Amino acid sequence: MTWGLIRAESPGNPYLNMALEEFLFKNLSNTGYEGFVRFWRNDNVVVIGRFQCPLSEVNYYKAMEMRTKVVRRFTGGGAVYHDQGNLNFTLVFKSNNKRLPELFEFVGNIVSAALKKMGFNAAFKPINDVLVGPKKVAGLAGGIQGNIVLVHGCLLVNSNLEALATVLNVSKEKLSDKAVESVRRRVTTLSSEVGREVSIKEVEESLLCEVVTRVGIRDLQEVRLTKVECVLIDKLCREKYLSRDWLALLCTYCPLRAEHEEKVEALAGVTELDKSGRV
Amino acid sequence: MIRVGEYKARDGKLVKVVISLEESRISGIIITGDFFLEPPEALEAICKKLEGVNVYNLGIALKNVEEYINSNGVLLFGVDVEGLGRAIARALDHESDAL
């Protein structure tokens, strides 16, 4: 069976990037493909997990100052900072295994194997991290719907870690079982580990090679989205990911909503999109 | 009165609750965090099981949450119901400093 390779991305429009993720997840069974592999990037965005509060995860004042966009994923897990030095990867496929921890292990081992081949001392660390040495370099999230699973993740290739540490809030409780006291010391990039600029392209090639081998893909075709698909993805983007309601998903019932409302509105307002924002 | 509590198990995920408390009754609650839950819609059902509960009956309410999860094929990981209970207990122990 044929797998589809998707390189469509809209770094200036993270809402559209997320809409494409959901579209692939919800529509795999209508496409005739066995699965999809996707590589994509965002620029200056905090992506929060499905069950997170934007104001807990984002340093509001810094995000406003840095014009950082905030988008909610449809998958669980934690908040991450994306710039163009961060490579996102996605696997969507049919599976009878409906245990997310095992799916994370499967994909985490693919990522760590790809990095090992590039010379990094990488390892998957349950629940959903990939480490280089003692530091986190990638995180995974995922969802299951029927017999379709999606696992996506982000890999810090040469991201701006100062910006990451500035705009993300991490509670003391979150770091309570870590040996370090700040997110800045807990994460690293591939480039800073080797002391040279590692390119997105070389990481993507290494990851793709490992995915093809470990998943057992015999036929991989680059997918061009049709006009109809683009219209549907754009519709999902506008109706869901660009909406204030989706960002404020959990606010409706929150006892702190009166105090938070104005700030969530302001974060939802940072949505001007650049012209590369087309899939 | 609004209370906030959070809890993270070792090598687990963070769970945070914001509770509005009327005397000893939980009149509103939201559960947030970086845990995983499938299907995601189950979160609303879990909150409903805790709303209106007198804090002295929290143990029974948490058992109801556990039963709901087990009997509906809900997958919660990164945190368990005991961890959720700890976050709630911490919230009840101290008032919100988030205001």
Image: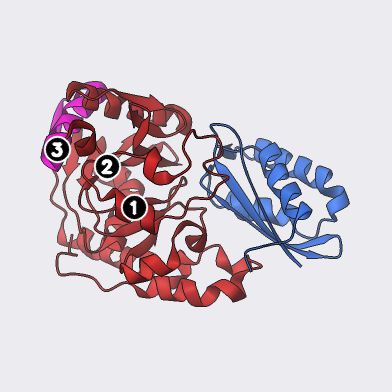
Chain colours: A red, B blue
Q: Are there few (<14), some (14-19), or many (20+) residues within 10 Å of tag 2? A: many
* Whether labels 3 and 2 share one chain: yes
The amino acid type found where label 2 is placed reads Leu
Residue A171 x/y as whole percent? 53, 50
Q: Quadrant of residue A273?
A: bottom left
Q: Main secondary structure of the magenta part?
A: helix
Which residue type carries mark 1?
Leu
> Which residue carries the number 3 mark?
A198
- Amino acid type assigned to the residue bearing label 3 in the image: Val
The percent coordinates of residue B43 (x first, y second) are 60, 51
Q: Residue at x 55, y 72 (%)?
A: A260
Which residue is tagged 2? A156
The label number, if any, that marks residue A82 in the structure image: none
Q: Is residue A202 magenta?
A: yes
The residues tagged by marks 1 and 3 sit, at their Cα atoms, a distance apart of: 18 Å
Q: Is residue B75 above or below residue A45?
A: above
Callout 3: helix, strand or loop?
Answer: loop
Tell whether label 1 touches label 2 (CB within 8 Å): yes
Question: Which residue is labeled 1 in the image?
Answer: A164
Q: Chain of mark 1?
A: A
Tell me the crowding category of disc 1: few under 14, some 14 to 19, or many 20 or more residues within 10 angstroms, Cα based: many
